[in-house]
Image (spheres, rainbow, N blue to C red):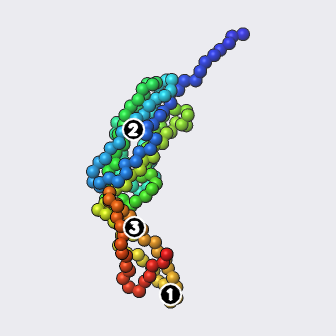
Amino acid sequence: EVELRGHEVWGELRIEPETVDFGLQIPGQVHTRTVTLSNDGSTTLRIHETEVFDTSPWSHTIGIVGVQGADETLEIPAGESLDVEVTFLPDPYMEPSTAPIATVVFHSNDPKTGGSAELPVFGKRRGPGLEVFPPDQVYFGFVGEGGTVVRQVSLYNASMAPITVEKMWIEGNFEFLE
């Protein structure tokens, strides 16, 4: 009878920070944040693919720099780290949202993450001030006599300073419903 002992060995990916929030940024300029990929495992971590997963219509504004090409594998030895850059190029027509713009997915040999670790990325474009959505006009369609149609209009502060709305009005024969 022979007694065998051992322990599991694998790479273990840790991403810091766990989310990236660019906050309000100027459109047309590339903004960057550093993300650290660490291997807390006991053997080499292999990241074989990195992708920006679409989670919004603005996912194309997010990029990642410092990772491999499609046919290469990024290796991080046990106990070591690697910094990569996440980029944000705000689109001037981005609408405000509290949801992530995109999710960066790192595919690796880490069994604890099931081979895929996600990094949610948030950001908004900074604008000149108060913005109204929809921006042009609110369409009510055909409304019969005595009928009522309600449409929502959102006010968004796209600037870095507080804004106070002191007065609102509607032109024509309409009214505010609260």
Q: How far across and down, in percent of the image, does residue 34 sit?
A: 36, 39
Q: How far across and down, in percent of the image, does residue 178 sit?
A: 49, 75
Judge left or right: residue 111 versus residue 17: right
Whether residue 75 is visible: no
Report the disc number at residue 122: none
Residue type at numbered disc 1: Gly
- Secondary structure state at the residue bearing disc 1: loop
Residue identified by numbered label 3: 155
Q: Quadrant of residue 154?
A: bottom left
Mark 3–mark 2 distance (CA, rounded to whole Å): 33 Å
Mark 1–mark 2 distance (CA, rounded to whole Å): 57 Å
Name which of mark 3 and mark 1 comes first in the sequence.
1
Name which of mark 1 and mark 2 comes first in the sequence.
2
Report the disc number at residue 144: 1
Residue identified by numbered label 2: 35
10 Å neighbourhood of mark 3: few (<14), some, or many (≥20)? few
Query: What residue lies at 27% left-to-right and 51% top-to-bottom?
Result: 29
Q: How far across and down, in percent of the image, does residue 78 sit?
A: 46, 24
From the viewer's side, name the closer residue of 132 and 169.
Answer: 169
* Residue 171 sits above or below residue 10 on the image: below
Residue type at numbered disc 3: Leu
* Residue 8 sits above or below residue 136 on the image: above
10 Å neighbourhood of mark 2: few (<14), some, or many (≥20)? some
